[in-house]
Amino acid sequence: MSLKLAFSIIALSLGLGLAAPAEAQQGTFTLKLCNNSGGDILLSVAHRRSTTDNRFMVHGWYAVPTGCNDVPGLPKGWFYYFGLAADGQKFWGGDTNICVSSKGSFERTITQNYACTGDEALVGFEGINVQPNQNTITVTLRP
């Protein structure tokens, strides 16, 4: 199944609802990403641009092979992820809807009234609020 078709099947029609703290939280955390799905995953993430910038950015697609990898230096506060099995048969996400590209790698700042373009789909990202005292967060993607 093609990536574009997979997005068409899972695309949602709800608006963007990212949470942003009133003040920038200081510090970064390490994401420990474990792919226990049995196959490769394509991943997109959204997070604050930096520890002092409350604007959010979204970027992807990152190939995530089976096993665990550390991604250091992500700003604390809200962090979001969406994973898609490379074969398009499964996805990992949540209730926060963000437009992602169906044509390949992308990166952009998230703006409040952004509407998906022709090569994008609205998908549900899972959100995690990383607290100031948390230095590592583990996300495990299972079958």
Image: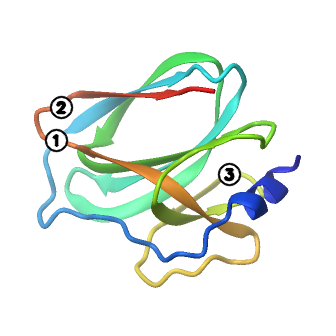
Residue 134: assigned label: 2
Q: Earlier in the sequence, mark 3 or mark 2?
A: 3
Label 1 sits on a secondary structure element that is: loop
Place residue 91 in its image quadrant.
top right
Residue that carries the numbered disc 3 in the rendered image = 105
User: Quick one: 142 or 101, which is closer to the camera?
Assistant: 142
The residue shown at (48%, 52%) is 94
- Residue farthest along the right direction in this orientation: 1
The residue shown at (72%, 23%) is 39
91 with respect to 23 (left or right): right
Residue that carries the numbered disc 1 in the rendered image = 131
The residue shown at (34%, 56%) is 49
Q: Earlier in the sequence, mark 1 or mark 3?
A: 3
Label 3 sits on a secondary structure element that is: loop
Q: Amino acid at mark 3?
A: Ser
Can you tell which of label 3 and label 2 is closer to the viewer? 2
- Residue farthest along the top direction in this orientation: 67
Residue 99 is situated, as x and y percent measured from the top left of the image, at 58, 67
Place residue 56 in its image quadrant.
bottom left
Place residue 38 in its image quadrant.
top right
Label 2 sits on a secondary structure element that is: loop
